[in-house]
Amino acid sequence: MGYTAVHAEWGRLDASLEDLGCGRSWADVHRVGGLELACPECRGRVFARLSSHRARHFYHQVRPETCALANESPEHHLLKLELATAARAAGFRAELEVSSATRNWRADVLVFDQQDRPFMALEAQLSPMTAQDAALRSRPEKLYGTGPDNLWALSAAQQAVTELKTGCTTGTIAKKDMDQLGGSVRWFNDHNPEVKALPVMMHPSRVSDAKATAVPGMRVVTPELFKKLKEAVTSYAAALASSPDRWANEQAVREQLAYHKLTGDRFFTTYAEPVRPL
């Protein structure tokens, strides 16, 4: 199954949007005989269907073994929908299952900025992975060829510019790591002058080395706060999973994000702390 399909005249269809993202209704595609829809991944024919929980999606009549989109798990698809719903609830335009022009990568959810430019790819991840694996999957190099480890959209006017230093064993934040974060903030400001940057570093220590100059306004996610964050995210997911319909309910998503302090205005004030001089 998948949330997107392609029509020869209408273009790209997104089942998670009321107008399918192309000015059409679900009635135009659901149980319509002779309608030709194609999978955006393998180009095989797909059909519109409602799941047992009334979730709209597209499916292959015969699932091809070589189509990555068709072989994703139901849990993966639900998480993709949750990511898109959260991005839209935060005020962004978000598209599901978007491939690059060269088809060398596909974002589960692609988020667009206020100028309608793609600036963030969100990935649903259910299998175990390390923080280093996460960094490799979410670097802006995938879109720009350079930049920080990670960008998090906190609001339309602010993004967190993040560097991951979880592999460090020093008791302080070294000068080279601090300089790297500063360079990432400058890169971000060059590419997004209308958006405010919040410098963030994941590091075992919040203490700056004596030779390092802290990036103004930076916050540090320490192991203790990261543990607190994981507990909050787990509780948030469990709350939404308590009912099949809650995943796609924007109001329910907003309420749980606020309750667990996972909103853009509270995230890093809760799960990160200011850098401290030695």
Image: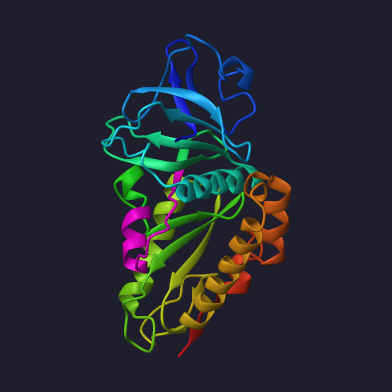
Residue 194 visible? The answer is no
Measured as percent of width and height from the top left, residue 35 is found at 48, 12
Residue 136 drawn in magenta:
yes
Residue 216 visible? The answer is yes
The image quadrant that residue 143 belongs to is top left
The image quadrant that residue 127 belongs to is bottom left
Placement of the N terminus among the 4 image quadrants: top left
Q: Is residue 47 left or right of residue 69?
A: right
Residue 10 drawn in magenta:
no
Measured as percent of width and height from the top left, residue 150 is found at 41, 58
Placement of the C terminus among the 4 image quadrants: bottom left
**In the displayed structure, would residue 142 be above or below residue 231?**
above
Instruction: Tell me the magenta residue range.
Output: 119-138
170 and 43: which is toward the camera: 43
**In the displayed structure, would residue 154 be above or below residue 142?**
below
Q: Is residue 245 left or right of residue 228?
A: right
Q: Is residue 191 left or right of residue 23?
A: left
